[in-house]
Image (cartoon, rainbow, N blue to C red):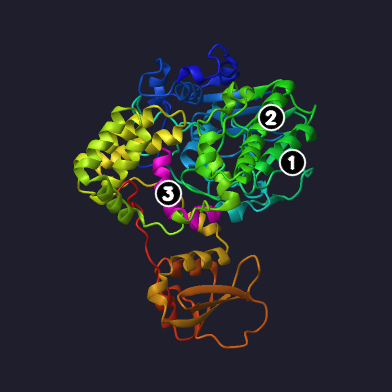
Amino acid sequence: MAETLPSFEDTTDVANADRGFLGALVPGVVKADDGRVIWDNDAYAFLEADCPDTAHPGLWRQGQLASRQGLYEVTEGVYQVRGLDLSNMTLVEGTRGVIVIDPLISVETAAAALALYRAHRGDRPVTGVIYTHSHGDHFGGVRGVLPHGTGDGVPILAPAGFLEHAVSENVYAGNAMGRRATYMYGVGLPTAPDGQIGVGLGQATSTGTISLIPPTVDITETGQEETVDGVRIVFQLTPGTEAPAEMNFLFPDHRALCLAENATHNMHNVLTLRGALVRDSRVWAHYLDEAIEYFHGQYDVGFASHHWPTWGHDNVVAFLAEQRDLYAYMHDQTLRLLNEGYTGVEIAERIELPPALRRAWHARGYYGSLSHNTKAIYQRYLGWYDGNPAHLWEHPPVELARRYVEAVGGPADALAKARAYAEDGDLRFAATLLNHLVFTDPDDQEAKDTLAGVYQRLGYGAENATWRNFYLRGAQELRGGITGEVIDLANPEMVMALTVPMLLDSIAIAIDGPRAWDDELVIDLVLTDGPTGAGTRHRLTLHNGALTHREATAPPRTPAGLTLTLGKAQLLGLLAGKGVDALGIGTEGDPALIARLLAYRSQPDRTFPIVTP
C-alpha cells in the first residue's frame, strides 16, 4: 500500500497542522448537560503510534494530522479551533468582539470552542456569525455561540439559498441519510486501531444538540462586500460546488482567504456514501479557477472549514490549481469514457489520476474516492441505468440472491467457493458471493461471520475513511445485529426553521400512498403569521394517494372541506399530534379531515437493515 503513496519525507502538512498552536482543551472531551460524552478527541491518542496492519498508512497519516486539537492562530486577528468536531470553527476579531465562522455541529462543542478561544484571547462578545454553506457541521452549534436570549441584532451571513438547502437535505430524506451516516462515520465502532480511526475530513461527528438560527444577511452575488464589526469581507458565491449553497470570502485587511469546504486536504465527495444530491464537479472546478483569479494577490494565507491552513500566496495558488485540476480531470475523463460507451463501474476501474495529482497528499481519497466519485459523475449525466437490457429489470436483492446461490450449487457450495475466493485474495467477489448467501438466508450465522471477516479485511486495507467505516460497521452488524445507534439529522430547532411549504412537503413525503388511494379531501390553511404575511392561504389536496399543495393567490374557485386558521407554531403542534381544539385553531368545515389526513403518515424505521434483508 505504502509504495503507491506520496513521499512521507514531505512534512509540509505536519508543519502547517502544528503552526500557530496556542493551547488545547484539556481534557479534550465535551459533555452534554446530562453528563453524556458527545465529543472525545483524546480517544484518538493511539494515532501517535506507527501505523498497524489494521489500517492504510495514508489514512493513518491523515488521522494523525486531523486529530490535532486546540486553538491556532492563522494570522493576526484570525484564529481557528480544530479537533473539537468534524469541522473547524474560525474566529475573526473585530472592533468590539469576534466574528464566528461555522459554529460546528453541536451546541456543546461550539460553546467549548468559544470558551477555549476566550481563555487565550479574552472574553470578547460574538458580534457576527457566518455560515459558509448549508451542511449541518457548519451551523448546528450556533446556539453555543449565541445562546437563546442573546444575539439580538447580531448579523448572521450565509449564501443565498442556504436555509432551503440546510433544512431540505436533513428532513426530506433524513431518515435514510441518518441510518447510512452511521456507517459512513463509523458510529458505534470502537475508536481504536482496528476500528474507527477518523473520516478523512476530520475525526468524527459530535452527537450533541443541533440548532439553527436563520440568516439575517443573504450573500447574493460575487463581489458583494459587507462590513461586520469593522471587518471588511468580500464574497465569492460558489453554488453547486461542495454544497448547493456555498461561498468563499476574503478578509482583505487580514490578507486571509476562506475557502469554505471547496478546497480541503483530501479529495472530497462528488456524492457522499450516506446519500445526497450529486454535486457538479465541472462547476466545482470552475469556481476554484475563478477564485484563483478573483482573489489573486490579495491574501497570504488560505484556510478552510476542515483541516489546516496553507501559508504563502504562491502555495495557496498551487494548492487551488491542483484541487481545480482534480475535479476537472475526474469530470472530463469520466465524460470522455462515458461517451466511448463505458459504464460507471467500468470507468471507475479504468480511470487514474495524472502523476502530479497522485503525488499530492491533498488529492488522496480519504473522504471521497476516485472510484465512487466517477460513478457519481456518471450518475449525474446518465442516471442509474447503464444501458444493458439485462440490468433494466433485475430481481430485487433477496430474489436475486436466492437464484444466484441456487445457480452456484446451493448454500454449502456458495460458502465454500466464497472462502476460496477470499483465500485467493479476491475479497471483492468473495463479498459479492457471501452477500448473496446472507440475503438468501439471513439466519445463516456462519455465512454472516464469513462475510464479516471479508468486510473487515477490506476495511483494514481501505485508504478511504468512509469506505473503511462502511466495511467495519457492516461487519459489526453482521456479527452482533443492529444496535440502534442513529444520527439524528432532524431536530426541533431544524423543524422550526422550515418554511410552511417545506413543512407541507414533509407531510406529503410521509403519506402512505396505497392506504390513501381511495380517499379524497381538500384542506385550506390560512396562516396568521410568517414571512408572506397574515392571511396567506395554502391549499392541500389529497387525490390518488398524492398530497399536493399550493399557495392560493386568489380566492379558491371551489370551497375546501376544512379551513384552518392558525399560526406556524400551531401548525407544528398539529403535526406533533396535538388536537385542533387543544391548540386553539380556528376551524370552518369538518375538523375530522385533518386527523384523517395525518393518519395516513407513515413512521419510517430509523434502524432499517443494510447488510441483511
Q: Which amino acid does the dot numbered 3 rest on? A: Gly
Q: Tell me residue 498's x, y (percent).
A: 55, 60
Q: Does 335 appear in magenta?
A: no
Q: Does 169 appear in magenta?
A: yes
**Going 50% across and 69% down the picture, which residue do you hit?**
571
Q: Nearer the viewer, residue 599 or 98?
A: 599
Q: Tell me residue 381's x, y (percent).
A: 61, 50
**Going 41% across and 20% down the picture, which residue do you hit?**
47
Q: In the drawing, what numbered circle is on residue 235?
A: 1
Q: Is the C-beta separation of discs 1 and 2 under 8 Å?
A: no
Q: Earlier in the sequence, mark 2 or mark 3?
A: 3
Q: Tell me residue 183's x, y (percent).
A: 39, 41
Q: Which residue is mark 3?
A: 178
Q: Is the C-beta separation of discs 2 and 3 under 8 Å?
A: no
Secondary structure at numbered mark 3: helix
Secondary structure at numbered mark 2: helix
Q: Nearer the viewer, residue 3 or 183?
A: 3
Q: In the drawing, what numbered circle is on residue 320?
A: 2
Vertical relation: 417 (above or below) 612: above
